[in-house]
Amino acid sequence: MKAFTIGANDAGMRVDKFVAKVAPCLPKSLLYKYIRLKRIKVDGKRTAISQRLIVDSLVELYVNDEFFEAKAPTFLDAPTHVEILYEDENILIVDKKPGLVVHEDESGSPDTLIGRIQHLLYERGEYDPEQENSFAPALCNRIDRNTGGIVLAAKNAPALRILNEKIKVREVLKRYLCIVHGHLKEKTGTLTTYQVKDEAQKKVHVYDRPMPNGLTAVTKYHVLDEQGALSLLEVELVTGRTHQIRAAFAHIRHPLLGDSKYGDNECNRPYKLRYQALYAYQTTFAFSTDAGPLNYLKGKTFNVEEIWFARKTHSGFCIQDSLRR
């Protein structure tokens, strides 16, 4: 038998979710069976699967020891270098550089953005997995390996729950800069498309009309600069779909510069770029409803000032000189 006292970072979790984290090798079928058989109790009493835990509750698990075995944390194998734009006791706002994955992928490399953040906080003494029952610092949004820009991370469970909800209800605004091939006829506009995921190819297919299993993708844009055969755009995501910006502009025949998945390799070749010209450069906490302990972030905007393909001027951004033809 093992017992766990619920702390602030565990409070609010459902019993089944908590047990799945502290006993990661316990099959779901056994988990639900053990709840029915009262081998999993809260404060000495029968519990329901959906019961929410509160601070100082005692969760008792009459479960074999092998179900508690877990892999050693891999974050200690990650570097600790993180480019921090803002930090407080609840959150980190970081600038992820192109080439770094946010979470572990099929390569199995421990060098991920979340690994770096967890290692950094561990070294500072702000995070110790042995002192936590179920929580680990986590990312609230993600961007592709070859895209750079702002990623939000939560240091505690309340901050994670709030930011995830605010992102879901679109009270966290994200703006991107990107370079596309060609000049857009409409210099300001909104693209409404319908995306269908292709898991086998790890990409999305885009349509102009609703499709079965399709998701609506809404993308606002404004042209900031035009040089030669390229255009610099500021883009705002109304929805947050997989590869949304890359797929939407490729669909209207203005693919992103440097994008090998959705783009035009023949047009990209002269520029010899390693990554697509896409950067999540600005985040605004546009809270219109209560954010609890994160209310102090309301109305705040955070920016990345240096972007590898764009140069900042007194009036905004223009295409970097090295990309002009």
Image: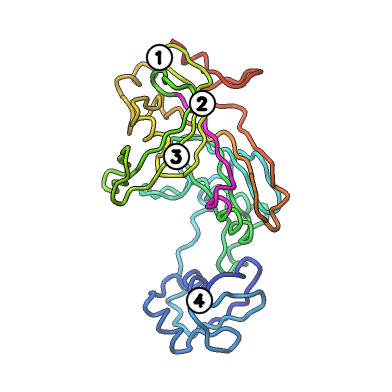
Which mark is on residue 222?
A: 2
Tell me the SS state at disc 2: strand
Quarter of the image where the C terminus is located: top left
Select label 3 or label 4 by which is in front.
Answer: 3
- Left or right of 243? Residue 200 is left
Q: Residue 63 in the image: state x and y as whole percent.
A: 46, 83
Q: Residue 275 in the image: state x and y as whole percent.
A: 42, 29
- N-terminal of the two: label 2 or label 4? 4
In magenta, the rendered stretch is: 166-179
Tell me the SS state at disc 3: strand
**What's the CA distance linking mark 2 and mark 3?**
14 Å
Query: Is mark 1 in CB contact (under 8 Å) with mark 2?
Result: no
Q: What amino acid is at disc 1?
A: Ala
Which mark is on residue 229?
A: 1
Crowding near the residue tagged with mark 1, few <14, some 14–19, many ≥20 C-alpha atoms within 10 Å: few
**What's the CA distance linking mark 1 and mark 3?**
25 Å
176, 84: nearer the viewer = 176
**What's the CA distance linking mark 1 and mark 4?**
57 Å
- Specify whether residue 227 is painted magenta: no
Residue for badge 3: 218
- N-terminal of the two: label 3 or label 4? 4
Tell me the SS state at disc 1: loop
Query: Quick check: 43 above or below 97?
Result: below
Which mark is on residue 50?
A: 4
Which mark is on residue 36?
A: none
Q: Residue 80 in the image: state x and y as whole percent.
A: 58, 45
